[in-house]
Image (cartoon, rainbow, N blue to C red):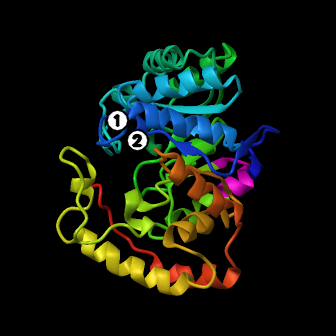
Amino acid sequence: MIDKNFAKSEEKVSLLGFGCWGIGKSMWIGAEDAESKKALHKAIDEGITLFDTALVYGNGHSEKLVGEVEKESGRKIFVASKIPSMKYEWPAKDSSTLKESFTKEHIIKSTEQSLRNLKRDYLDLQQFHVWNDKWAEQDEWKEGILKLKSEGKVRFFGISINDHQPWNGIEAGKTGLIDCYQVIFNIFDQSPADKLLGFCEENKISILARVPFDEGGLTGTINEKTTFPGGDWRNNYFRGDRKKEVALRVEKIIEDTKGETGSVAEAALRYLISFDAVTSVIPGMRSEKNLLLNKAAVEKGKLSSALMEKLKAHRWIRNFYS
C-alpha cells in the first residue's frame, strides 16, 4: 500500500483509508458486524492504516468496532474520529453560533467518550464534524484543542468541512491549529481543486477526500431501477429522477475513461490520488471484496494528465443532500 506523510509530521498514513460510517449501521441498512470486522481486519492485513470514524456513527458503534479490531490485530493504526455539533446539525447552519455548537467542555467530553468507545488513550486525529468559518477567530475551540493536545489525548486536529463548501474552513486553517481537512471531493464535485488544495499544499495541511464515489453514484451500479432497503438514507439522496440522471452522466465518464481504467469506480479513486495535495481517500467499505477492488485501483496510480484534463468536463454543481 502506498503511504504519504500526514500534515507537517513524519507520520505515514495509507493513501487508501477506510471510511467507517457504514459499519456504524444506523443509517446504512444491511451492514453486519461480522462482515464489517472481517473487512477491517483485511484492511489492516493489506496495509491500510488510516481509519475514519465518528462519535455519531451508530452512536459510538463504529468506534467500538474499530477499537475491537485494532486490539485483536495487535497492530497500531491511525484512528480519526469526529465531534458532533451540540445542535446535531449537518451541515452547520450559517446562523449557528460557536457557543451553541462547540464549547470547550463539549469538545473535551466528546473526545473522551470516543476514547472510551475505542478503548484508546489518544486519537491520532480528532475533527469537528461540521464547521462555520465565522468561528475561526474565537478562542473557545482553540482552548479545547490545546487542552486535549497538552494532555496527550489528541495528536492532530482537523475539520470535516460542510457538504460542498470546501472554502468553509480556510480561515480556521490560517490559525495554524488545523492539521487536516476532510472534504467531499470526486469527479462530480471538483470544487476543492479551486482553492482548498492550493492552500493545503502551501501550509502542509492534509486532505482526506471523502465521498469519492458520490455515495454510490460513481460506482457504476446506480440506475433508474436501483432500489435500497427501507430506512436506508440513500433512498432520499437518490430520490426522484436523480438515479436516472446519475446513470446518464456516468455513461459519459465511462466513455471518456475507457482504455485507461477498467471501471468508473477505478477512475473515481485514481482521479483523486492524481492530486498531490490528497493525503488519503476514504471510501466507505463494508466487505472484503470492495476493499480489495479499491486497493487494486489505488495501486494502479495516477491518471494521465490528458485524462485529468478531460474529466474537468464532468464537474456537476448540485447538492443531493438537501
282 and 317: which is toward the camera: 282
The answer to whether 309 is drawn above or below residue 124 in the figure is below
Q: Which residues are magenta?
A: 199-206
Q: Which numbered circle lies on residue 277? A: none
For the residue pair 171 and 78, the one nearer the viewer reads as 78
x and y, in percent, of residue 297 in the image: 62, 63
> What crowding class fits label 1: few (fewer than 14 Cα within 10 Å), some (14-19), or many (20 or more)?
many
Reply yes or no: does residue 211 show up in magenta: no
* Residue lying furthest right: 10
Residue at 32 percent of width and 43 percent of height:
28
- Which residue does the numbered mark 1 point to in the structure image? 25
The answer to whether residue 137 is visible is no
Q: Name the residue that disc number 2 marks.
A: 22
Name the residue at 38% across, 65% down: 217
Secondary structure under tag 1 reads: loop
Q: Is residue 246 above or below residue 127?
A: below
* Between 235 and 278, the one nearer to me in the picture: 235
Q: Is residue 44 left or right of residue 310?
A: right
Tell me the amino acid under the disc marked 1.
Answer: Lys
Q: Are marks 1 and 2 in contact (CB under 8 Å)?
A: yes
What crowding class fits label 2: few (fewer than 14 Cα within 10 Å), some (14-19), or many (20 or more)?
A: many
Residues at marks 1 and 2, CA–CA distance in whole angstroms = 6 Å
Q: Position of residue 134 (x, y in %)?
A: 44, 42
| x, y percent for residue 210 | 50, 52
At 51% from the left and 53% from the top, the residue drawn is: 290
Q: What SS does tag 2 mark?
A: helix
Q: Quadrant of residue 199?
A: bottom right
Residue closer to the observer: 261 or 183: 261
Q: Is residue 38 above or below residue 321?
A: above
Q: Position of residue 71 (x, y in %)?
A: 62, 20
Residue at 52% x, 73% y: name it.
Answer: 263
